[in-house]
Each structure stands twice: as C-alpha cells, then as structure tokens.
Image (cartoon, grey):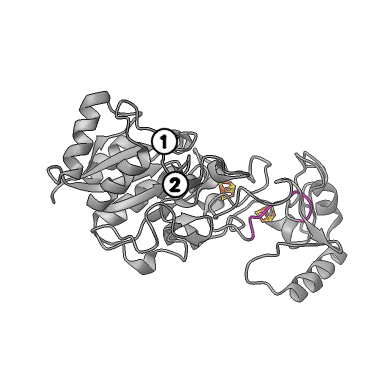
C-alpha cells in the first residue's frame, strides 16, 4: 500500500490538541502513524523545517507538485479584521492563514478539523469574537465557516470534525486510520460530521458515579462523590463522547477527576449562558435533561429514586471520601 502524508497547521487556538495528541498511548503517536503508513509532511511542533522551506512546501502542494492526503487544521480560522484574515499571518509569509488553508483544502484528499476551535470556532470564537473566528465548515451549529457548506475534499467527504477541547489522541489517530483505509463513509459521521467512532457514546456511559445518578444522590460541592448533574453542571448525559469508556492518559476523565463534563465536543459549548459548574434549573428541575428522555419521565423517575435512595449513597454523595462502604452480607452458618 502506498504511504500517505499529513500536513498539520495551527491557527486560533491554544495548541492543546497537539499536546493531547502527543499523549497517545498503546501505541504512541509515532508508532501509530508509522504502522498506518502515514508520514508527517510537516507539523509546527514536530518538524525541523521553518520559514522559507515550509513556504516552499506549501506552495508545492498548492501547485499540485506534492500530493496531500491529510490536511489537519488545529485552532479556529481568524477572518478579522474586516475579512482580511490579517489577525493571523503565517509566520514569514506575510499571507493570512485563512488564505493558505483555503488553497490547501482544494488539494487535500481529506481535510480534518482537529479540536472544537477548528471544527466550530470553539473558545476562540466566544464572547464578542473580536477576531471573527470560525470553524472550517461550521460556525457554531451553523454550516458554512471558512470553506463554505458545499466544500468537499477530493476524497469525497466534507471537513471531518474531530471535535473536543482538547480532542482525545485516539479520536485523531483512529479517524486517520479509518480514512487511510478508505473506510470513511458519510454515515460514519454524525450531523456535525464528527466521527461516530466516539460520538455514538455519551460521557455518562461508564461514569463511575452512575450508582449515584440512578438514585439522584447528588454532589453539592466540588470534590463531593455524588452525581454532578443535579447541582454541579454536569452535561455527561447529553455529551456525545466516549470519555468514560475510552478514558484519557492511562485512566482518567473529567468526571473521574471531579469536574463536571462541559460537553466540549459540541458546537457552542463555550457559551453555556451560565457558570460551567452550576446546573440551570426551572422550578428545581434541571433545564438540560438526559438525551432521549421525556421531561415527565425524568421528573417521575427522579422523585421515585430519591424516595428510595439508600442512606449509604445519600451520605457518600455529599462527602469527598467514602463514609459508608456497601454492606457486607454474611451467610448464616449455624
Ligand atoms: S456525574 Fe455526569 S456523567 Fe457521571 S453519572 Fe452524573 S450525570 Fe452522568
Ligand atoms: S468529559 Fe466532557 S468536557 Fe471532558 S473531555 Fe469529555 S466531552 Fe469534553
């Protein structure tokens, strides 16, 4: 099989998706790409070439002299000021990054938005968005972005949105492996063109607070062991990602570290319209209810569950350490 190549550029973001990618484990990033037959043409953190050498490389791709399999863009596209893109000139070239990306995207077999900034605008587009930041093919939930809603790479797919803030290293490497084998088809992606290999799960799946969730035994303060949905802003029941079944960096996740899931794989997660660590409620009922669950069911189930909550869970939920372990049932050996 012919080897494929990958070009990675960074724009309006924090570089955290690259940091995350470098944490790829079992196997590591270099071995994964090597075994998948993917060579890095250039990456700002991993490659030696700078300046004129890089410019020459980009120009040769645009001229069609160097074929490009994977164009990976990390960070949002900064269109300001006034549509010129001059808030981000690619170092040494004097040319706005949005122009480089637009031209390179015409040549790529697959274009991937790495992280929620590149996919939807993300944190960089929040608040007043003074840089006019956008995603490659979405601006928040709306199709369009820098490349426009009709864009398709030469491999036949729109921009593949490997969203997350940051994205999980496996989400990137598994998507690349799927595409390099030409096994990426439109129905492998969801409505926001995120790979279903990780968005067919909810963060809630596999959360080790599920017993507390079932009985609505809720955390009330940071560090408490209970479920964080009722008071602490957890969106795990609505967040499409496999963070609690795939786990991060050898075994962690946001909820396992005691933080609410803020649904960072979703467009517009950066503007929750309330604190990230508080659950908005109307008449005491959380506004954001679990995916697929009618409100009336949730209310009925929640009150039944609360009535049946074992004392062990009630007390442990409001504590930062286990107070009551499960009761040990002994057999009666008379
Ligand atoms: S803390 Fe969040 S992810 Fe965990 S059980 Fe509660 S709602 Fe689900
Ligand atoms: S648990 Fe939620 S906030 Fe944390 S990485 Fe996963 S989707 Fe993002």
Q: Where in the figure is residue 126, as x and y percent of width and height?
A: 59, 45
Tell me which segment is drawn in magenta. 230-237
Q: Where in the figure is residue 172, as x and y percent of width and height?
A: 39, 47
Q: Where in the figure is residue 53, as x and y percent of width and height?
A: 21, 27
What's the mark number on residue 118?
A: 2
At a point 38% along the width and 65% down the height, the residue shown is 188
Residue at which label 1 appears: 86
Tell me the mark number nearer the camera, choosing from 1 and 2: 1
Q: Secondary structure at mark 1?
A: loop
Residue 332 on the magenta segment: no
Q: Is residue 331 above or below residue 77?
A: below
At a point 67% along the width and 51% down the height, the residue shown is 272
User: Which quadrant of the figure has residue 85?
Assistant: top left
What's the mark number on residue 230?
A: none
Nearest to the observer: residue 113 or residue 78? 78
Nearest to the observer: residue 270 or residue 86? 86
User: Which quadrant of the figure has residue 87?
Assistant: top left
User: Which quadrant of the figure has residue 46?
Assistant: top left
Q: Secondary structure at mark 2?
A: helix
Quarter holding the C terminus is: bottom right
Q: Distance between the Cα atoms at labels 1 and 2?
A: 18 Å
First in residue order: circle 1 vs circle 2: 1
Q: Is residue 61 left or right of residue 283?
A: left
Estimate how packed mark 1 is, as few (under 14), some (14 to 19) or many (20 or more) residues with alpha carbons within 10 Å: some
């Amino acid at each position: 099989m012919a080897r494929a190549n990958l070009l990675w550029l960074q724009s309006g973001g924090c570089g955290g998706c690259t940091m995350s990618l470098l944490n790829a484990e079992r196997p590591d990033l270099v071995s994964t790409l090597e075994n998948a037959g993917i060579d890095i043409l250039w990456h700002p953190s991993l490659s030696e070439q700078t300046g004129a050498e890089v410019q020459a490389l980009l120009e040769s791709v645009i001229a069609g002299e160097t074929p490009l399999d994977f164009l990976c863009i990390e960070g949002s596209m900064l269109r300001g000021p006034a549509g010129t893109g001059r808030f981000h000139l690619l170092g040494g070239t004097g040319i706005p990054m949005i122009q480089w990306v637009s031209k390179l995207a015409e040549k790529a077999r697959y274009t991937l938005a790495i992280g929620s900034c590149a996919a939807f605008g993300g944190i960089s587009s929040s608040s007043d968005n003074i840089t006019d930041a956008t995603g490659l093919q979405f601006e928040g939930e709306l199709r369009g972005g820098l490349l426009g809603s009709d864009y398709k790479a030469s491999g036949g797919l729109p921009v593949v949105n490997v969203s997350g803030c940051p994205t999980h290293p496996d989400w990137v490497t598994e998507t690349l492996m799927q595409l390099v084998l030409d096994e990426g088809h439109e129905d492998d992606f969801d409505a926001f063109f995120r790979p279903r290999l990780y968005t067919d799960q909810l963060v809630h799946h596999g959360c080790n607070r599920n017993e507390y969730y079932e009985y609505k035994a809720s955390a009330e303060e940071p560090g408490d062991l209970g479920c964080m949905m009722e008071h602490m802003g957890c969106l795990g029941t609505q967040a499409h990602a496999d963070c609690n079944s795939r786990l991060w960096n050898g075994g962690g996740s946001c909820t396992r570290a005691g933080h609410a899931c803020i649904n960072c794989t979703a467009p517009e997660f950066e503007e929750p319209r309330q604190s990230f660590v508080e659950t908005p409620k109307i008449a005491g009922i959380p506004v954001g209810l679990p995916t697929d669950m009618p409100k009336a069911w949730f209310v009925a189930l929640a009150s039944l569950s609360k009535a049946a909550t074992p004392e062990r869970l009630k007390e442990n939920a409001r504590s930062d350490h286990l107070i009551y372990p499960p009761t040990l049932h002994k057999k009666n050996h008379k």
